[in-house]
Image (cartoon, coloured by chain):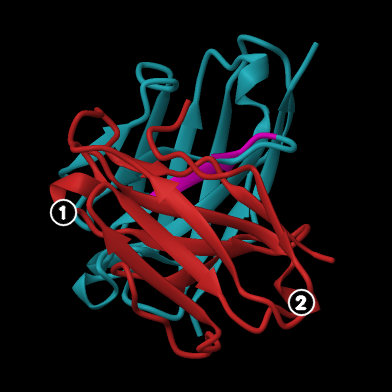
Amino acid sequence: QVQLVESGGGLVKPGGSLRLSCAASGFTFSDYYMSWIRQAPGKGLEWVSYISSSGSTIYYADSVKGRFTISRDNAKNSLYLQMNSLRAEDTAVYYCARTGGSGYSYAVDYWGQGTLVTVSS
Amino acid sequence: QSVLTQPPSVSGAPGQRVTISCTGSSSNIGAGYDVHWYQQLPGTAPKLLIYGNSNRPSGVPDRFSGSKSGTSASLAITGLQAEDEADYYCQSYDSSLSGPRVFGTGTKVTVL
């Protein structure tokens, strides 16, 4: 079965850095677009970034552009999010998510359990 | 500030029908892009509920249905049950944004 397991969250000071990882299993990782989606405490969902199956196409939300970098290692079935220059407003649960193929109209068909990032001094 | 607007909350008694609207514009829903819906139960990750405007993934009860018209989409829940109490989000694609995939503002469904 499809599993997405995030790790790397924690407490970091403003201006600091953190690297999130997502270990994927149960499907052919290299066939799917992947995304990071976040949810601030008590708030709605925000698409942070997504990356194509080969890694050649990447998009970022304006709120993180220039500070966050998404990457993937298809040989290791892993997705990453390097977060630099962190701000208090980056505090959120970060979800790793798989974009389903054309059969699901490219909706997000699987989500990880999420990892909490807290930016505070 | 999302480009897809949903009512903050809707409520209904068990067995009733409730609808959640998702209002967009000509650069997203009105441009013909698909709308998807997600359900987020308290303390859990979101789950895909409706994809491609009106399709249910395997395992989603047929009490849930989706539709799209013009620049808006709707999610309907018929025969409301206690376990439907959750947050619901629409999602689509917006050609005017640099990170073009966008979620709606979210709607809390309360079962009275």
Q: Is residue A18 above or below residue B90?
A: above
Q: Describe the element under mark 2 as helix, strand or loop.
A: helix
Residue hosting label 2: B83
Please tell me which residue lies in front, A27 or B23: B23
- How many angstroms separate mark 1 from mark 2 (CA)? 32 Å
Q: Residue B8: percent from the left, percent from the top?
A: 64, 42
> Which region shows up in magenta?
A35-40
| Residue drawn at point x = 55 percent, y = 85 percent | B63
Q: Amino acid at mark 2?
A: Glu
Q: Is residue B17 above or below residue A76?
A: below
Q: Residue B9: percent from the left, percent from the top?
A: 68, 48
Q: Chief secondary structure of the magenta span?
A: strand
Q: Is residue A83 left or right of residue A105?
A: right
Q: Amino acid at mark 1?
A: Gly
- Of labels 1 and 2, earlier in sequence is 1
Residue hosting label 1: B32
Colour chain B appears in: red
